[in-house]
Amino acid sequence: MKTENKHTLTATRGVCYKILSESFSSPEGLELRNIKILYDEMEKVDREAALAVEKMKESYQATGSRSELMVDHARLFIGPFSLLSPPFGSFYLDQEKRVMGDSTLSVNDLYMKFGLTVASDFHSTPDHISAELEFMYYLTAKELDAVEAKDKESSARILESQKLFLNRYLAPWIPEFTLDLEQNAQTPFYRNFGVALRRFVEREHRYLSGDIP
């Protein structure tokens, strides 16, 4: 792949990871322009994911206020009594199906190897979906730096880190998590969010495995 094409693809992947991560925050912070940007970038890598983002945008625009989205967000990801779509890797990866399991500690150890810690104002666990997507964004940003510097060795090493993290800690639980999301969401916004996330992660798995040139 030519350097300029590699640069464009890496930048696109990074934007998708960044906006997907931010979209798990409270709907109070959602901005229509970011959903539009996500659509534009997703269309470059996966048409079905882009179509789901288009439906997210339509749902967002059709909602008179954000209160409907906020209620759905709380039901799915916060509680207070039970989570319909627990956004934690350990819930799906560990046999105990509990938060802060062994896989959570492994994820945190990997962050620390890159000199990263969970921000003090991030009131959740290291394996929260938004944190894991944010970490993948961080890795694509590091890859982008290496591509711009024409440092092929560093670029290849960072790609291997992306592959390891995605295959070991993120991709394995996304199918079940997004199925929970699609089945339990009351708004088209979050149902289609599940579709977009699953399609994008599946595409990333194929790309990092070398199945997509």
Image: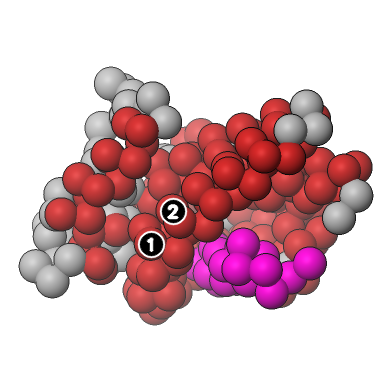
Image quarter of residue 153: top right
8 vs 31, nearest the viewer: 8
The residue at the point 39 percent across, 42 percent down is 131
The residue at the point 53 percent across, 69 percent down is 198
Specify whether residue 27 is in view. Answer: no
Q: Are marks 2 and 1 in contact (CB under 8 Å)?
A: yes
Q: Name the element at disc 1.
A: helix
User: What is the number of the mark on residue 168?
Assistant: 1
Specify whether residue 103 is in view. Answer: yes
Which residue position is annotated with label 2? 165
The part of the chain drawn in magenta is 194-213
Q: Residue 4 at what x, y percent from top left?
A: 90, 42
Q: Residue 195 at what x, y percent from top left?
A: 56, 71
User: What is the number of the mark on residue 153?
Assistant: none
Q: CA distance from mark 2 to mark 1?
A: 5 Å
Residue 200 magenta: yes
Residue 8 magenta: no
The amino acid type found where label 1 is placed reads: Arg
- The quarter of the rendered structure image containing the N terminus is bottom right
The residue at the point 28 percent across, 21 percent down is 120
Q: Name the element at disc 2.
A: helix
Q: In this picture, is 122 found above or below 47?
A: above
Q: Residue 54 at what x, y percent from top left?
A: 72, 62
31 vs 212, nearest the viewer: 212
Characterize the local packing of mark 1: few (<14), some (14-19) or many (20 or more) Cα atoms within 10 angstroms. some
Q: Is residue 90 left or right of residue 159?
A: left
- The quarter of the rendered structure image containing the C terminus is bottom right
Q: In this picture, is 152 found above or below 75?
A: above
The amino acid type found where label 2 is placed reads: Phe
